[in-house]
């Protein structure tokens, strides 16, 4: 069987964001497993103006499509802003349709309540895009998993949770690949 490609999607583009730290931590844990090719995909690197906005520079849309299409599954790094996902993540999800279909995803979230509310919103969106999200959900608290709310210092139990999530993402991604 071919090695699976799992994209770790950084869901924020805001200045001062913590998603690169979280994404790099997840990738470091995932790479130790040796069960897939893990790639960080940062939506901030693609020019994706608001979908349908006139005159916006959407020159990054084709590259965004290619990056997502090349994946067999995903890990979304979802931060909670105002009880939901970021506008940039929602916009990036909306840019594509077929590229998401019949793939699996895990979610690693963070926020004042671990990003739980953002995760629930993201799950509904992923369902509409025919992305099967897995049950295990590592939820990082800004108060206990980040030093001064700025530097990731995840508790050891969180690493276990990431591995349990990937234990679900990998077989689901492999199974869904058979129907694409």
Image (cartoon, rainbow, N blue to C red):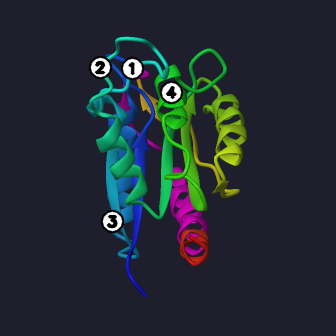
- What is the spatial separation of the Cα atoms under label 3 and label 4, in whole angstroms? 29 Å
Q: Is residue 87 left or right of residue 116?
A: left
Q: Is residue 102 magenta?
A: no
Q: Is residue 132 visible?
A: yes
Please give the residue where the numbered disc 2 appears in the rendered image: 57
Please give the residue where the numbered disc 4 appears in the rendered image: 91
Q: Earlier in the sequence, mark 2 or mark 1?
A: 1
- What is the spatial separation of the Cα atoms under label 3 and label 1, in whole angstroms? 32 Å
Q: Is residue 112 left or right of residue 10?
A: right
Secondary structure beneath disc 1?
loop
Binning the other alpha carbons within 10 Å of mark 4 as few (below 14), some (14 to 19) or many (20 upward) gives some
Name the residue rendered at 69%, 42% in the picture: 123
Q: Is residue 120 left or right of residue 27?
A: right
Quarter of the image with the N terminus is bottom left
Q: Which numbered tag is attached to residue 169?
A: none
Q: Nearer the viewer, mark 3 or mark 1?
A: 1
Residue 157: x, y in percent? 55, 54
**Disc 2 vs disc 1: Cβ atoms closer than 8 Å?**
yes
Q: Earlier in the sequence, mark 3 or mark 4?
A: 3
**Disc 3 vs disc 4: Cβ atoms closer than 8 Å?**
no
- What is the spatial separation of the Cα atoms under label 2 and label 3, in whole angstroms? 35 Å
Name the residue rendered at 29%, 20% in the picture: 57
Secondary structure beneath disc 2?
loop
Residue 19: x, y in percent? 39, 34
Please give the residue where the numbered disc 3 appears in the rendered image: 31
- Work out whether residue 134 or residue 26 is closer to the camera in this orientation and state it: 134
**Disc 2 vs disc 3: Cβ atoms closer than 8 Å?**
no
- Work out whether residue 134 or residue 94 is closer to the camera in this orientation and state it: 94
Image: magenta residue range: 148-171
Q: Earlier in the sequence, mark 3 or mark 1?
A: 3
- Magenta-drawn stretch, dominant element (helix, strand or loop): helix
């Amino acid at each position: 069987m071919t090695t699976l490609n799992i994209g770790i999607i950084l869901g924020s583009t805001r200045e001062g964001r913590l998603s690169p730290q979280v994404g790099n931590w997840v990738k470091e844990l995932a790479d130790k497993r040796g069960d897939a090719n893990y790639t960080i995909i940062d939506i901030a690197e693609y020019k994706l103006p608001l979908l349908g906005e006139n005159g916006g520079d959407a020159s990054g849309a084709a590259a965004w499509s290619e990056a997502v299409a090349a994946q067999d599954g995903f890990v979304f790094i979802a931060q909670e802003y105002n009880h939901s996902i970021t506008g940039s993540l929602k916009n990036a999800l909306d840019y594509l349709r077929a590229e998401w279909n019949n793939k699996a995803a895990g979610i690693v979230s963070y926020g004042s309540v671990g990003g739980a509310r953002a995760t629930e919103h993201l799950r509904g969106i992923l369902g509409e895009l025919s992305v099967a999200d897995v049950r295990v959900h590592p939820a990082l608290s800004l108060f206990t998993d980040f030093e001064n709310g700025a530097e990731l210092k995840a508790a050891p139990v969180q690493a276990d949770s990431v591995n349990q999530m990937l234990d679900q993402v990998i077989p689901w991604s492999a199974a869904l690949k058979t129907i694409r």
